Image: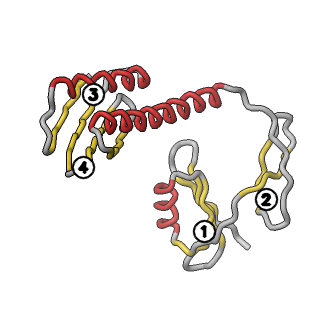
């Protein structure tokens, strides 16, 4: 663990350094790897501030606390960072569990009259309509639509052609290129 402690208007004593490093070891165990930590301690009149920035192998956590005692400020900011790290750890483990499960049958959802239909196939092969978000068609050129598709990371973009005013679709192909559907009426 690499700890860098900076003191503003306060001298960083060996006892203060040892206290901060002990608290950061608990965070290191939670994150499961070596950390780089930068701790800034400051005293301004009656305010005692502790600001910590921790870099782990996979994430960056920051926190700042202000109390009447420097040790209490360190405690509170470490607690804040532990909550952030635990939340991140829970998110990663729940994502791993969710990806590991096999796909089950589609849950049937009732469609309101205003929803745009979207077809999704069940494991039995019967199509089901599933609610999808509605959005306004933007007038774009084909090149602009392709750029917007690249920018937002979606698989499909429906837009209105700016010259012909027809509804077109651009989509991401399996080979990584962009496809265009320009229907004839």
Sequence-earlier tag: 4 or 3: 3
> Is disc 4 surrounded by few (<14), some (14 to 19) or many (20+) residues within 10 Å?
few
Name the mark nearer the viewer: 2 or 4. Answer: 4
Answer with left or right where residue 131 lies relative to residue 41. right
Residue in front for this viewpoint, 106 or 137: 106
Q: Which residue is mark 3?
A: 20
Sequence-earlier tag: 2 or 3: 3
Are the residues at dot 1 and dot 2 in contact (C-beta closer than 8 Å)? Answer: no
**Badge 1 element:** strand
Q: Which residue is mark 2?
A: 117
Sequence-earlier tag: 1 or 3: 3
Q: Position of residue 15 (x, y in %)?
A: 20, 24
Name the mark nearer the viewer: 1 or 2. Answer: 2
Q: Position of residue 123 (x, y in %)?
A: 81, 34
Residue 80 falls in image quadrant: top left
In the figure, 119 relative to 20: above or below? Answer: below
Residue 93 falls in image quadrant: top right
Write the residue at 24% across / 35% down: 38
Residue in front for this viewpoint, 104 or 52: 52
Are the residues at dot 1 and dot 3 in contact (C-beta closer than 8 Å)? Answer: no
Sequence-earlier tag: 4 or 1: 4
> Is disc 2 surrounded by few (<14), some (14 to 19) or many (20+) residues within 10 Å?
some
Q: Quadrant of the C terminus?
A: bottom right
Sequence-earlier tag: 2 or 4: 4
Q: Position of residue 99 (x, y in %)?
A: 63, 30
Q: Distance from label 2 to label 4 (Cα)?
A: 61 Å
Write the residue at 20% across / 46% down: 43
Q: Which residue is mark 4?
A: 46
């Amino acid at each position: 663990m690499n700890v860098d402690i900076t003191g503003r208007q306060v001298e960083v004593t060996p006892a203060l350094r040892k206290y901060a490093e002990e608290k950061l070891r608990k965070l290191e165990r939670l994150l499961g790897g070596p950390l780089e930590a930068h701790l800034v301690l400051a005293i301004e009149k009656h305010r005692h501030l502790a600001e910590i920035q921790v870099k782990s192998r996979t994430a960056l956590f920051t926190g700042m606390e202000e109390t009447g005692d420097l040790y209490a400020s360190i405690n509170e900011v470490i607690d804040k960072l532990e909550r952030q790290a635990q939340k991140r750890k829970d998110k990663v483990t729940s994502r791993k569990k969710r990806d590991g499960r096999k796909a089950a049958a589609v849950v049937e959802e009732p469609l309101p009259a205003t929803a745009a239909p979207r077809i999704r196939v069940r494991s039995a092969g019967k199509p089901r309509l599933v609610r999808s978000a509605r959005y306004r068609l933007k007038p774009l050129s084909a090149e602009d639509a392709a750029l917007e598709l690249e920018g937002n990371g979606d698989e499909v973009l429906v837009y209105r052609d700016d010259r012909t005013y027809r509804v077109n679709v651009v989509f991401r192909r399996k080979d990584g290129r962009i496809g265009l559907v320009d229907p004839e009426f």
